[in-house]
Amino acid sequence: MSDPHDFSGQTVVVTGGTRGLGRAITLDFLGRGATVYATWHRGEESAAALRDEVGPDTERLRLARFDVADAAAVASFWERVEEECPQGVQVLVNNSGIRRDAALALMPETDWRAVLDTNLTGSFLMSKGAVKHMAGRRYGRIVLITSPAARHGFEGQTNYAASKAGQVGLMRSLAREVAKRKITVNCVSPGFVATDLLADLPEALREEYRRSVPLKRFADPAEVAYAVRALAAREASYITGSVLDVAGGL
């Protein structure tokens, strides 16, 4: 029986893969033998630090800088992948995401569009490229990083919640479309994770969020990376159209 945790010989794309949760996912797959394309748009220092950190795994780390909401840039990326990966990409993790919080009545339209463009349109564009790449090879794993905000909603996050709910709808429809090509599509829904997305919140609000979690703590990014890896495994061949909560009981 094959080892479900061995990704040797597989190629994985992780959007937003150089910091925060994406960094943990990138490191997890690298540690399991995969070649990983870690995409990034902003944060050159984080990309450089990741490259330095992986040490001997550097030859299997490929950094790609572009905006996932830019259709031309996404198409160019997949053209590069086709040239560099004759054996194909087996896994796409749509992790890129931003927050621009404000009450709806005070939210600038630019902030609404920026969050929807990155979180939802970015997932659409990257998944579209991945499906075209994977379909002829009749294999693939697509994982979208959504949020409990899609189900519960949080004050000041109408744009973020809408984008995350949209990802779930995208996932469920796409899972039906590509099942015959042996491509699975699922979501991982992390609760509060100890990353930069929480670091900019006031301490009092962070503590309120922490108390709301039945396990009374925030997740370590590695715990979410494990869930992503589980859905990306070859053995997860009968799991599609699902949302896996990694939220400490929320």
Image (spheres, rainbow, N blue to C red):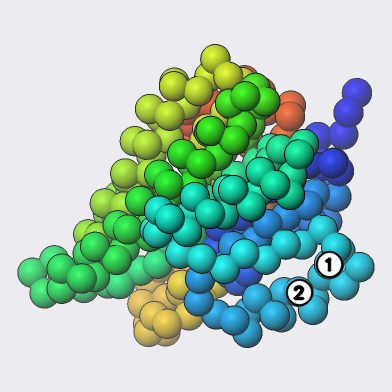
On the image, which quarter does residue 48 sit in? bottom right
Residue appearing at x 39%, y 80% in the figure: 201
Q: Is residue 11 left or right of residue 131?
A: right
Disc 2: which residue: 51
User: Contact, CB < 8 Å: mark 2 with mark 1?
Assistant: yes
Q: Which is nearer the eye, 4 or 198? A: 4
Q: Nearer the viewer, residue 118 or 99?
A: 118
* Residue 166, placed above or below residue 157: above
Choose top left, top right, bottom left or bottom right for residue 227.
top right
Q: Is residue 234 visible?
A: yes
Residue 99 point in image, percent of width and height: 35, 69
Q: Quadrant of the N terminus?
A: top right
| Residue 193 pos. (x, y %) | 53, 64
Q: Residue furthest left?
A: 105
Q: Among all residues in the image, which is located at the extreme top? A: 180
> What is the x, y in percent for residue 149?
34, 53
The local secondary structure at tag 2 comes to helix
Q: Is residue 153 above or below residue 90?
A: below
| Residue appearing at x 79%, y 79% in the figure | 52
Question: Could you say which disc has been placed on residue 58 in the image?
Answer: 1
Q: Amino acid at mark 2?
A: Arg
Q: Is residue 86 left or right of residue 37?
A: right
| Location of residue 138 in the rendering, given as x and y in whole percent from the top left corner | 65, 22
Q: Residues within 10 Å of mark 2 (few under 14, many from 20)?
A: some
Label 1 sits on a secondary structure element that is helix
Relative to 238, residue 190 above or below:
below
Give the image quarter of residue 101: bottom left
Q: Residue at x 84, y 41 (%)?
A: 9
Type of amino acid at the residue the image marks with label 1:
Thr
